[in-house]
Amino acid sequence: MKISKYIVSSKSDKACWSTLLEKAIIKYNAIYEVDTEIGGIGSHVVPPLFTGEGESFGFPANVLNADQLKVMVENSLMEGKFVVGGFNQVKPIGNTNTVIGHAYTYLLSTDPNALFSMRNPWGGNPGTNGKEDGVLNIPDDGIIPTLIDIGVTGPGKAAPMKRDIKPYTPPTYSFTTHKMRVSAVLMKSGM
């Protein structure tokens, strides 16, 4: 079976591991009916499939305040845990918009005014040139933090790999035009 590069690609039309994993989850769930409520790879029940770690928990949007989200992200990352989540509404952040029904990874931010960063595994965000490599610095603006859900998973066998956690600095690429192939339904608000 030939897989189209448009189904599993990211920057420079290279294979995107997160898209491949998401498709594996969909297939696994369709066969074994593990959890009919998995809403994409952002769910806190998904990373344990890949880490083998059962220690997983999450909070839906508007449960934790901005300070609690910041502490949870920082402490979880420092403990070597995987932190994923997303947004429940499309809202502007800087020169782009959030994407719903989609997972982002949580990172420490290089911006001292941000709570933390969230990175889109697509390596870009809608309407941007990709230089930020998908990184959104999350402001404490009273709006965006209320839209964020968060899931934390133990590192499983990756625990010994924990290193000093530092903010993510996007790599320098020579950029070319890259059309993001995103379903129009993900770009609509109110879902």
Image (cartoon, helix red, strand yellow):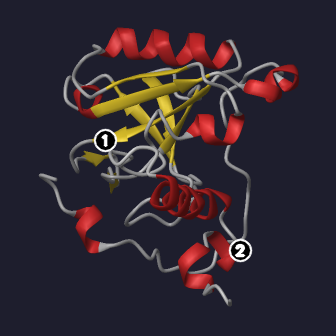
Q: CA distance from mark 1 to mark 2?
A: 26 Å
Question: Which residue carries the number 1 mark?
Answer: 87
Mark 1 vs 2: CB contact within 8 A: no
Q: Is residue 66 left or right of residue 180?
A: left
Q: What percent of the width, then of the height, locates residue 40?
A: 42, 52
Could you tell me the amino acid type at mark 1? Phe
Question: Which residue carries the number 2 mark?
Answer: 14
Residue 59, quarter of picture: top left
Q: Is residue 172 above or below residue 10?
A: above
Q: Is residue 55 above or below residue 9?
A: above
| Rendered residue at 31%/41% (across/down) | 87
Residue 3, quarter of picture: bottom right
Q: Is residue 62 above or below residue 45?
A: above
Q: What percent of the width, then of the height, locates residue 32?
A: 51, 53
Disc 2 element: loop
Q: In this figure, what is the number of numbered marks?
A: 2
Could you tell me the amino acid type at mark 2? Lys
Residue 157, quarter of picture: top right
**N-terminal label among 1 and 2:** 2
Q: What percent of the width, then of the height, locates residue 78?
A: 67, 13
Q: What percent of the width, then of the height, locates residue 178?
A: 54, 79
